[in-house]
Image (cartoon, rainbow, N blue to C red):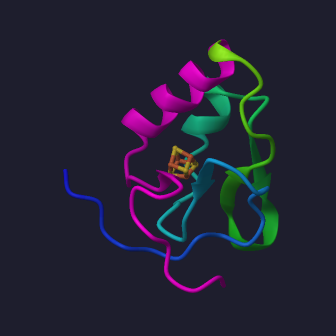
Amino acid sequence: MEAVESKKLPYNVPGKYYTTELCDGCAYCAAVAPENFDFEKSSNTYFVVRQPRGMEEEEFIQEAMDDCPVDAIRVCGELQPLAEA
Ligand code: SF4
């Protein structure tokens, strides 16, 4: 699936991974990588609360990214985010 451009959510901590406005709040990523994703109630979205510490967390994030139903989890540099929200 080709990634569509979408704005990076402002809550993401700086670093390699981030979520975008495509997030529909399904919570899958937080189930797979609970240390790395958290919920932002006002926008009903999940964001990267912690970049991976070690290979295991990196693998969990990759799994969440691969299976995110709306392709909202991105890697910096792979597709430039639109202007910060
Ligand atoms: S898996 Fe994707 S759509 Fe679901 S909460 Fe995480 S980032 Fe949002």
Residue at 49 percent across and 30 percent down: it is 62
Instruction: Identify the residue at the far top of this view.
Output: 56
Residue at 74 percent across and 39 percent down: it is 51
The number of callouts visible is 0
Which quadrant of the structure image shows residue 19? bottom right
Measured along the vertical axis of the image, is residue 56 above or below residue 4?
above
Q: Does the magenta stretch include residue 72?
A: yes
Measured along the vertical axis of the image, is residue 65 above or below residue 16?
above
Residue at 53 percent across and 76 percent down: it is 7
State the residue in front, 69 or 54: 54
Tell me the magenta residue range: 56-85
Which quadrant of the structure image shows residue 54? top right
- Residue 31 is situated, as x and y percent measured from the top left of the image, at 64, 28
Which quadrant of the structure image shows residue 67? top left
- Residue 34 is situated, as x and y percent measured from the top left of the image, at 74, 29
Instruction: Identify the residue at the far left of this view.
Output: 1
State the residue in front, 84 or 65: 84
Quadrant assignment for the C terminus: bottom right
Residue at 61 percent across and 25 percent down: it is 58
- Residue 38 is situated, as x and y percent measured from the top left of the image, at 77, 46
Q: Is residue 65 left or right of residue 1?
A: right
State the residue in front, 40 or 62: 62
- Residue 3 is situated, as x and y percent measured from the top left of the image, at 29, 60
Q: In this view, does 70 lie to the left or right of 29?
A: left
Q: In this view, does 67 lie to the left or right of 73?
A: left
